[in-house]
Image: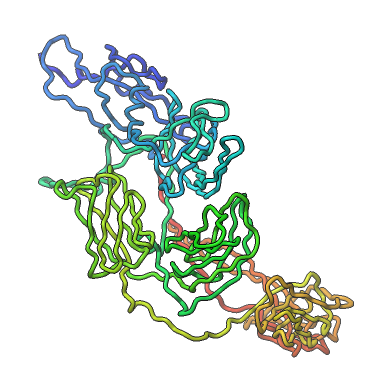
Amino acid sequence: MTINVDDVKLLKSQRLTDEEDGGGRATGEAVTDGEMNNLFPDISRLDRTLGRISLRKVFAGVMTDNADPYLGVHSIVTEAPQDPRVSVLLFNTDSQTDERRDARSVIEGYVVPSTTASFELLGDQFAGQRALTGLQRVEARLPEVGEVYQLVDGMNTQYVRIQGVEPTVEEFVWAYDNGSFVTFTRRRLALSISSPLLRKFPGGQPHPTGTTPQNLSGSSKSQVLATQVADAARYYGISPLASAATAGDMNLNVQSVYAQLVPSATRESALTNQPGGARSGYMVASSPNSRTLSLNFTQVASGHSRAFCTTGVLPQSVNLSIGGGVYADDGAGELTHRSGSDSFTRITIDYETGEINAWRSSAFTGSASVTYRPATSVTGQAITGKIDITLGSRGYAYTLNLAEAKPRPGTLSVSFMALGKWYELRDRGNGELVGEGSGSVDFASGAASISLSALPDVGSSLIYSYIGQLDDNIVSHVGTGPVPDIRIEHRLPHDGIEPGSLVVTVTMGSEPVTLADAGDGTLAGAAGTGQIAYASGMLVLQLASTPDAGSSIQFDYDRAGFDVDVPLTASPDTGGMITGTIPGAPLKPGSVQMRWQSQRKATIPSDNNAATAYTGTVLVDHEANDDGAGNWIGYLGSVNYTTGAFSLKVEQAYDYHEHEVRYELIEV
C-alpha cells in the first residue's frame, strides 16, 4: 500500500508552550493543517513593540496502517510570513526528549566562556543595573564595545554585552600592618551593558594585586570571563531571489542570507575622515628651539592634578620641574624621575594636546616649570602590507622587513585575527610594540619582531600599517605670520545707550587702555576700534592685541533719556524697498534701529501627484542699524535724521532647497 502525501504529518510535542518545560517527547496527535494558531499564538501589541521569540517543537511522522518504508525525508520553509516584522527559522537539537530550556541553551551557545577577563568587578553590582564598574591594571587592554563577558557567582551566571566604555585612571591606597600603607594606580572602568543584571554579583575592593577575594559583606567575589564564538547550531529559513534564475545556473542571488533570531535593536554610526593605522599622525617639531613655560597645576580629582602646555610637544624633549623634583619623558607619554625629590606616583603627557597629568597621595596644586620643543601632529600616507596565514606559516612569532620604507615612531600597527576576532599591537613610539602580544621595531633599519598572544586563524592575514619616514612630505616655514583679528561681540545689559557716552576699558600689558564712543556709532582709541548700535546696546570690538589673562573688559555709559519704539506698516515695492517716516524726528544719529521678519519657503513635490507641491515656510529675523551718517549698516537705503524719512530694502532673492518625498507602500 503506497504512502500518500496526506499520510505525512507534523506531530505535536507534549507541551506546545513557551514555558521552561515546553517541548518534550512526540505525541501521536497531528498538527491540524490550515488551522489558525495551530502551533503559535497570535502576536500581541506588546510583542510587536518589544519583540519575542517563540519556540515550538514538532516531529515528522508517517501515519499509515502499513509498514512501507518512507524513502527520504526533509523539512523546509516554503512561504515567508507576510508580516515583515516576523521571521521563521527551523533548527534541530538532535534530541527526542529535550525541552525549551535545552533549546534556549543551543541558541544562547553562540558564545562560550574562554579565559579570565582583563578586568575585575569593583564593588557589588546589583540587580537592575545597566552598567558595570570594573578595575584593571593601566597597561591592560580596554574592553571593547560589542564584546560579551560572562559573570559567574557560584552556580549563577549571566552573559553581558558591552555597549559603552568610559575609563579613568585613579590612585588607590591600601593600608596594612598597623598603619603602613601603599599607593597604586589602576584604571577604573564604567561599562554600559545592553540588558540589566538579573541578580546581584559581588565584587571585591581595590588591592595591589587586583581586588580582594571577598566583598565588604564577606561574600566571595564574582568571576568575569571573556568569551569566544562557538556557534554550532544551524538555522534554516527562506529568502526571495534577488535576480531571476535560469536552468543551468551554478549560483543564485538572494535578497539576504540573514534572518532575525532573537529580538534586538541595532544602531550604526558612520565615521568619516578617519585615517588608517593605529595612530592618526606623528609629531613633527614646529620650532628649532626649545621653550620654557610656567605651568599652573589644578586639582582634577583626589590625588590627580592637571596642567596644559599651550602647544603640541615633541616626544623625548620634555623636562618638568615640579614639587622639588625633575622629570623627563620617555617618548611614550610617561615622565620618569631624574633628580630631586620624588613625590609623584605617575606623571603622563599627551604629546598632541600638551596635557600633563600628575598623580600622588594628595593632589598637587601650584606652579611648575616645563621646558620642551614645540611640535605639531602631522598625518602622512599610510603604508600597508600583509602576511597570509596558512598551516605552514601559522605561529606566534613573525618578523617584518620594512627597510625600503622605514616607519616613523609611534605609527606602526599590527592586526591579526584569532578565533574570528581581530586583535592589535601598536608601537608606543619608543620601539616597543604593546597590545595583544609584544614586539619591537628598529626605526633605523626597519626591522620589526612580533610575538602574538594567540595563534592567528588559518586563512586570515596578519596586517601591518604605518607611516613612512618621507621627509619630503613636510615643509617647514620659519618666520612670523599675520596677527589674527581679535573680534569680540557683546550686548550691553541695557538698550537705549546715550550716543557719545560709552567708554570701553581693556587691560593690555598690565595697563588700562580705552575705546571712546564718537557719538555716531563708532568706537576708537588705543585699544582698537569698534561699532555700537545705541538702540539695542549691541557692540563689536576689534582689539589691537589680546587682553591680559585674568583681566576683564569694563563698559561705562549713560542710558538715553527715552526710547521710542513705534511699529511701522509699509509694503515693499517691486524692488523690495520700503519707504516711510519715523515719528519723533529729529532723530539722534546712530540711534535708529529697524527690526522686521521675512518668510522663506521650501517646496516639496509629491510623487503621487506631480501637480501638487507642499510648501513649508520659516520666519527669519532681521535687524538694521544706522551708521550715524544716514546709511544702514549691511542694508541698502538711507535715513534723514531731521525729517525721519527713510528707505530700506527688506526683500531680495534667495536660494531654497526642494525636497523629494518618497512613499513605500506596505501591504498590511
Residue 132 versus residue 604 in the image, above or below? above
Q: Residue furthest top?
A: 65
Relative to 245, say whether 233 is above or below. Answer: above
Residue 55 location (% of width, % of height) = 36, 25
Foreground residue among 230 and 349: 349
Q: Which of 564 and 493 is in front in this view?
A: 493
> Residue at coordinates 60% horizontally, 35% vertically from top-left?
178
Q: Can residue 553 be seen in this view?
A: yes
| Position in image of residue 154 (x %, y %) | 44, 24
176 w.r.t. 491: above or below: above
Residue shown at the point (30%, 46%) measured from the top left: 453
Residue at 52% across, 25% down: 219
* Residue plotted at (43% across, 28% down): 157
**Residue 288 point in image, percent of width and height:** 45, 80
Nearer to the camera, 211 or 83: 211
Residue 444, located in which quarter of the rendered image? bottom left
